[in-house]
Image: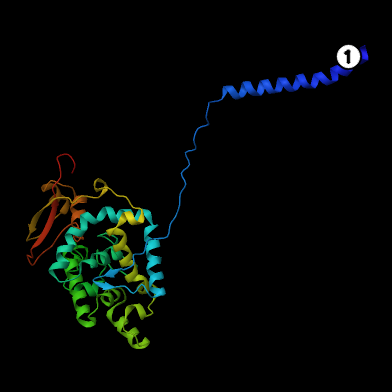
């Protein structure tokens, strides 16, 4: 009898243990929420940049049927479409600066697309200075700026003056167009210089920009301008969604004429209801804290019109 009971105990005991484990597991499971929380991870994807079937710069078609041309444009589209912080700032800044330069380009007979050349040159930075010493919105070297009518002294540097430097740029662009009769070559020459463009045309026995080999910066230059145009004109096509409220507004200004010396621009700023910083922000072409102006030349200074308590 004892032997029989031991035999059955060996069989029943494991069954009882297993049953207890199952019961405990069921109790633990019932204590969990009915459903697991949904993961907050968002799947991120990167797509090829959209290349339209036709692309024009200054009314001239870019020959995308050439594989090297299409791939060169693709490179610049990728570089700018995925340089998010920079490109977003360009899109946000455009409403503040384009209305200033667009009328000047139009008045001077320069295609509107050249406003994107200014973006490529300085990125809307009125104080931009290159390693080579080119300065301002349109990146003029000192000698070139003076050649096209800009005043450049220790106290005044009109390369930093948006309107006057845009006029100077228009003079160069018109001169180059009179030489080439082609806006694409005009843009290339703005980067590489007219002499270099002509020397490469003679050396390579080709005249079209898209058939010429230049140093890398000039080789990429027109494509970069075209890419900026495509993205900034159609930002949603490249996954940039910037609301009108996010864009930088035009700040209203009033003009004050200066026809004599200014002993101290800090005092001048305070007298006109702003601070020295804002005076220089809106007039970066004033390069000193004073103005000698012995000749009595007329200068026009912009004074931002701000709400009370914001200056």
- Which residue position holds label 1? 5
Q: Is residue 3 left or right of residue 271?
A: right
Residue visible at 29% across and 58% down in the picture: 232
The part of the image, by quadrant, that contains residue 53 is bottom left
Question: 82 or 67: nearer the eye?
Answer: 67
Q: Residue furthest top?
A: 1
- Mark 1 neighbour class, 10 Å CA radius: few under 14, some 14 to 19, many 20 or more: few
Residue at 12% of width from left, 57% of height from top? 301
The image shows residue 285 at horizontal and vertical percentages of 19, 61
Does 60 sit left or right of 273 as displayed? right
Q: Residue 125: where, in percent of width, then height?
A: 27, 59
- Quarter of the figure with residue 159: bottom left
Q: Position of residue 39 (x, y in %)?
A: 49, 38
Name the spot of residue 121 as percent of width and height, x first.
Answer: 29, 66
Q: Is residue 16 left or right of residue 76?
A: right
Question: Which color scheme is applied?
Answer: rainbow
Residue 262 visible in rendering: no
Task: Using the rendered view, name the quadrant where residue 238 is placed.
Answer: bottom left
Q: In the image, what residue occupies the spot 17% across and 74% down?
A: 171
Query: Which residue is drawn at the image coordinates 33% and 70% (left, top)?
Result: 221
Quadrant containing the C terminus in the rendered view: top left
Q: Relative to 284, say whether 43 is above or below.
A: above
19 or 266: nearer the eye? 19
Judge whether 208 appears above or below 82 on screen: below
58 relative to 200, above or below: above
Q: Nearer the viewer, residue 124 or 265?
A: 124
Secondary element at tag 1: helix
């Amino acid at each position: 009898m004892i032997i029989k009971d031991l035999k059955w105990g060996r069989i029943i005991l494991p069954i009882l243990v297993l049953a207890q484990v199952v019961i405990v597991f069921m109790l633990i499971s019932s204590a969990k929420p009915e459903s697991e929380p949904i993961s907050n991870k968002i799947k991120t994807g990167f797509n090829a940049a959209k290349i339209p079937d036709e692309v024009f710069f200054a009314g001239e078609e870019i020959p995308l049927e050439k594989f090297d041309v299409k791939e060169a444009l693709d490179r610049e589209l990728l570089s700018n479409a995925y340089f998010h912080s920079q490109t977003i700032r360009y899109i946000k800044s455009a409403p503040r600066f384009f209305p200033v330069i667009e009328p000047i380009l139009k008045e001077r007979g320069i295609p509107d697309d050249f406003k994107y050349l200014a973006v490529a040159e300085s990125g809307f930075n009125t104080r931009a200075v290159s390693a080579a010493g080119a300065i301002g919105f349109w990146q003029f070297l000192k000698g070139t700026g003076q050649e096209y009518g800009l005043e450049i002294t220790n106290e005044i540097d009109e390369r930093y003056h948006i309107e006057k430097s845009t006029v100077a740029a228009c003079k160069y662009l018109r001169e180059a167009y009179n030489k080439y009769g082609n806006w694409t070559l005009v843009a290339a020459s703005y980067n590489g210089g007219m002499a270099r463009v002509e020397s490469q045309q003679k050396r390579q026995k080709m005249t079209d920009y898209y058939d010429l080999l230049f140093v890398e910066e000039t080789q990429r230059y027109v494509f970069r301008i075209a890419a900026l145009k495509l993205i900034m004109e159609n930002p949603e096509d490249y996954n940039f969604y910037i609301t009108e409220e996010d864009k930088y507004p035009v700040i209203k200004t009033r003009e004050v004429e200066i026809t004599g010396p200014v002993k101290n621009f800090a005092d001048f700023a305070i007298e006109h209801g702003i601070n020295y910083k804002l005076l220089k922000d809106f007039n970066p072409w004033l390069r000193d804290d004073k103005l000698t102006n012995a000749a009595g030349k007329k200068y026009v200074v912009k004074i931002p019109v701000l709400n009370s308590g914001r200056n």
